[in-house]
Each structure stands twice: as structure tokens, then as C-alpha cells.
Image: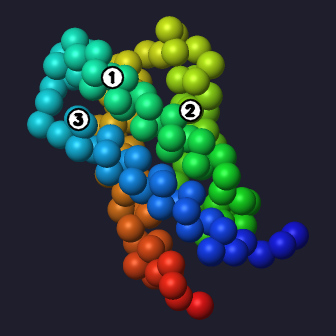
Amino acid sequence: MAKASPKTQYPYLHDMLEAARLIHGYVAGIAFEDFRRNSEKRDAVALRLSVLGESASKIDKATEKLLPAIPFKSIRGMRNRIAHDYGAVDFKIVWAVTQEEIEPLIAALEAHFQKNPPGGP
């Protein structure tokens, strides 16, 4: 099995970080009821979760092993649910993800980039 190339994985990890940061910003300072009633917020979060999942689907197994704190399978699963069955998306679950999973994801990706800068060896 080929070793992961940080150069080929960096753009996908960066896209994941950017999407997670945007999600975090979209829900900052609002309550679930505000989120539930605001279709623009729901759509924006759903789009960024899709971007997050699509980027996660490009991450190779070797890189996944380097980042055990990131639930790649769950991220890809959320993307698939949103992309293929948007009408059945449970926004209570989406909200829970934004409240419980996004900050740890941001922290894990930021820590990875601090240890492995894009221009490094």
C-alpha cells in the first residue's frame, strides 16, 4: 500500500477544515429553534456538511490512520444522507453534530496542520 502523500491529501483536509469553520460560524450564537426555523441556515449547514463529507471521501486510509480522532466514516455517511435523501434529513441530528462534533473536528485538523504544515517535508 502506498504511503499517503501530504501534498495530495492537504487540499482535502484543508477543505474539511474550511467547511467545519464555516459551519461553526453559521450556528454561533443561535438556538436550535432559530436554526430549525431558518431555511437559509439549515441549507448552508447542509451544504457545508456535504462539502465536508465529499472531501472526507477523498482521504486515503493511511491518512485516516494518522487522524484517529476524526470520524471519517460518519462524516461520509452524513454527506450521503444529505446528498441522496435531503427530504429525510433529521435536522435535530444535524444540530447535534454542529454542537458536539464540529469543534473537536476543527481542533483535530488544526493540530494536524500545526504538526504537518503544507510546505513541510
Q: In this view, does 52 lie to the left or right of 27?
A: right
Give residue 80's mark.
none
Q: Distance between the residues labelled 2 and 3?
A: 18 Å
Under tag 1, what secondary structure?
A: helix
Labelled pair 2, 1 in contact (Cβ < 8 Å)? no
Mark 3, other Cα within 10 Å: few <14 / some 14–19 / many ≥20: some
**SS for tag 3?**
helix
Mark earlier in primary sequence (2, 1): 1
Q: In this view, does 8 lie to the left or right of 100?
A: right
- Taking the view exactly as shown, the residue that stands out farthest to the bottom is 121
In three-dimensional space, the C-alpha distance between marks 3 and 1, rounded to whole angstroms, equals 9 Å
Where is mark 3, residue-wise?
27
Q: Marks 2 and 1, Cα distance to the nearest angstrom?
A: 14 Å
> Residue 23 appears at what percent x and percent y?
32, 41
Q: Which amino acid does label 2 sit on?
A: Arg
Q: Which residue lies furthest to the top in this view?
A: 87
Viewed as shown, does residue 59 lie left or right of 47?
right
| Number of other residues with Cα within 10 Å of mark 1, as a class: few under 14, some 14 to 19, many 20 or more | some
Q: Could you tell me if residue 105 is visible in this image?
A: yes
Q: x, y (%) of residue 54?
A: 59, 42
Q: In the rendered view of the protein, which quadrant contains the N terminus?
A: bottom right
Name the amino acid type tagged 3: Val
* Of callouts 3 and 1, the N-terminal one: 3
Across and down, in percent, residue 107 comes to: 36, 62
Disc 2 designates what residue?
79
Q: Residue at x 59, y 90 (%)?
A: 121
Q: Residue at x 27, y 25 (%)?
A: 41
Q: How crowded is mark 2: few (under 14 residues within 10 Å), some or many (20 or more)?
A: many
Residue under label 1, please give it.
42
- Residue shown at 77% from the left, 75% from the top: 3
- N-terminal of the pair, mark 2 or mark 3, is 3
Q: What element carries label 2?
A: helix
